[in-house]
Image: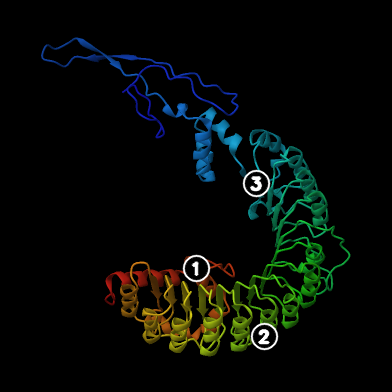
Amino acid sequence: MGQSPSSPLLAKSSSSSASPPRRRSLSSSFPMAPPRTTRTTVQVAGTGAGGGGATAFTAPPPERDLTQDLPDEILTLVFASLSPAERNACSLTCARWKEVDAATRHRLSLDARAALGHAAPTIFARFTAVTKLALRCARCSGTDSLSDNGAAQVAAALPSQRLARLKLRGLRQLSDDGLASLARATPAIRKLSVSSCSFGPKAFVAVLRSCPLLEDLSVKRLRGLPDTAGAATTITEEILFPPASLLRSVCLKDLYSALCFVPLVASSPNLRSLKILRCSGAWDLPLEVIVARAHGLVELHLEKLQVGDRGLAAVSACANLEVLFLVKTPECTDAGIIGVADKCHKLRKLHIDGWRTNRIGDHGLMAVAKGCPDLQELVLIGVNPTVQSLRMLGEHCRSLERLALCGCETVGDAEIICLAERCVALKKLCIKGCPVSDLGMGALNGGCPSLVKVKLKRCRGVSYECVEHLKVVRGDSFSISLDVVLEHEAGSASENAGQETGGHVQITELTDQMAAMDLPTNTAGAQPSANSRMRSVMSALRRRFGNLPPL
């Protein structure tokens, strides 16, 4: 009684003397005086046999806050390990913690509404060490998002020489002039990401002129792109982008008139990574223009694009290409893959989602086996390889460590046995929706000596007994999981196979599998359905307790 509740961070101590002077190394405008030792005397009525009278009780002094003895450098390390929400809460503990947090916080995410322009000077006067800034506005804010005038006020208050990363999201009231004012105030930024904004491609002319150190540019779902005739099918040359000599990575996603950015990409001679995802227009000619000026590409992602073998022939000129993603590009055939394999001998990662068009098969994969001996990761979705191509991959690609076979109708027991015999370096294997059985999986008992992880899904021919036997034979260092379709769902799953193959459900489930196997994902879909989560729960219960009795 008479004692205030102590913070969880306060250490208990029986000493009642004043605390020694606190060690400080960071500048502080709030020196903290040592806690005062106070004693509280309480009169307690006597309850003994003698009756009345009172006994004087002296309460102990408050416990001393030992965290005040911690140097600011230690507090900085503690704050660095906290989430933004936890860090915000800690900054409200006392004046010192607020000061240390403000002086050492490098990431800052702000609600970019119209009022931010007036609050910007106070915010950035407090957070002087910010190097990564995100300005976000929720969809429901509508016209209340940051405008050009507010952007000018924010730009005037920014720590221009420190800011290295800038992210803008949902700023629907920001025009080309607003982005230009932010770019002029941040000449040192190296990474810029914009999404769901209303400015157009001309705004990036000012960005390239004002930010000569820019290395990474990501543009997603812009609303200010031109919507004129032919804008989505031809390259727009009327926008003159200045050279971007340091630009190394560009991502274009969900853009209607993405071809407007082709001159920008082509003006980057040192470009190393290019991602073009779900953008309209024909991309064979644009890829020729880009590769002719940026032939040093190392990583290329193409997803849901109108691109064919002509575009892949242009890509084959990138002799240093190491990573290639072809996701749902139905016009690409074996001929295009052969052209890439014949010239891109440094290829390490290859992801192909054939969309079950059967245009890429054994011939293209055999060319990859011959021309890309350093291949380490291969993901095939909706592609139908056979023993012929898999044998060559195992013989020539001696460094193949990660392999995913999903929705491959021709991958059965013979193909798995071939992999077990040939792929000596294979460490991680993912099989989904393939007609394999215990016979093929049994070959892994003695094959693939480096194998440490196997993921099986929708392989109804594989039993849990086979999985448990593999665990016992290969030892504790080996991990295998099996998730099958429940019997009462098998009919509906087969009826909807065609729709599910081309939808978000299959891609989402495959993404989850690859994330568990530390494989890069090829697309981002919706969240797994309730039925999918229930199947996972039921599979885990069966692995733990065996087959459950019917309800």
Return the x and y of residue 440 as percentages of the image width and height.
40, 85
The label nearer to you, 1 versus 2, is: 2
Task: Please report whichever mark, 1 or 2, sits nearer to the chain's N-terminal start.
Answer: 2
Q: Is residue 106 visible?
A: yes
Please tell me which residue is depicted at 43% across the width and 73% down the height of the picture.
451
Q: Which residue is more in the foreground, 263 or 487? A: 263
Which label number is shown at residue 333? 2
Q: Is residue 9 above or below residue 192?
A: above
Position of 46 with respect to 326 (left or right) is: left
Report which quarter residue 139 is drawn in: bottom right
Residues at marks 2 and 3, CA–CA distance in whole angstroms? 43 Å
Residues at marks 3 and 1, CA–CA distance in whole angstroms? 29 Å
Q: Quadrant of the N terminus?
A: top left
Which label number is shown at residue 512? 1
Q: Amino acid at mark 3?
A: Lys
Q: Is residue 243 above or below residue 520?
A: above
Q: Which residue is mark 3?
A: 132
